[in-house]
Amino acid sequence: AEEVAFIERDVYKDGHYYRNFGGDAMDPNDWHHAPDGSRICRLNLKTRKQTVVKAVEKGDFRDLRVSYDGRRFLFAYRAGETHNYSLYEMGTDGGGLRQLTGGAGWDDFGPEYLPDGGIIFCSSRGKRFIPCNHAQGAQLFRMDGDGGNLLMLSANNVRDDRPAIMPNGLVLYDRWEYVDT
């Protein structure tokens, strides 16, 4: 590879790995996302030239992934003045931006391209909360590459996270089992 892609953004305020999206179940004014302002960038490894592909002063990018052919970016984005993330895709040159998911009240994040053209991702659409910290949980979902045919894949009562595709096409992910011991 001659280039790597990454997101520059501020860190979110809470130190818990799972409190990085959504809001607190007990306090409607406590939101867990990073502050506004972030950029999607490319870095040429030979020349060390950094190119800003897309930047926002209001809103926040997270969870950048590159398509198998290296032509598209998949990521979560929260628009300025809002609190929830949706999934978007665009060309690696910044063109052709399109929204794949949306809806107030839940967060879609952590997307990964699947070998069959679909997308697996994490979402708070399952409407579950982490018992000890009043934070939203997440489950795994799958959809077609155009955002259609949404399907819930997991039903963890706390959080499933960070899906990754293995070379044989199987999905590896983190699962938090809340055992209170």
Image (cartoon, rainbow, N blue to C red):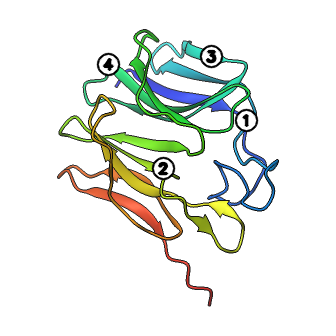
Badge 4 marks a residue whose secondary structure is loop
Badge 2 marks a residue whose secondary structure is strand
Q: Residue at x 47, y 26 (%)?
A: 5
The mark that comes first in sequence, 1 or 4, is 1
Q: Amino acid at mark 2?
A: Ser
Q: Amino acid at mark 1?
A: Asp
Structural distance between the alpha carbons of marks 2 and 1: 22 Å
Q: Quadrant of the N terminus?
A: top left
**Residue picked out by circle 3:** 55
Badge 1 marks a residue whose secondary structure is loop
* Total numbered labels: 4
**Residue picked out by circle 2:** 123
Residue 132: quarter of image: bottom right
**Residue picked out by circle 4:** 71
The mark that comes first in sequence, 3 or 1, is 1
Structural distance between the alpha carbons of marks 1 and 4: 26 Å
In the displayed structure, does residue 18 sit left or right of residue 158? right
Q: Is residue 123 above or below residue 77?
A: below
**Residue picked out by circle 1:** 10
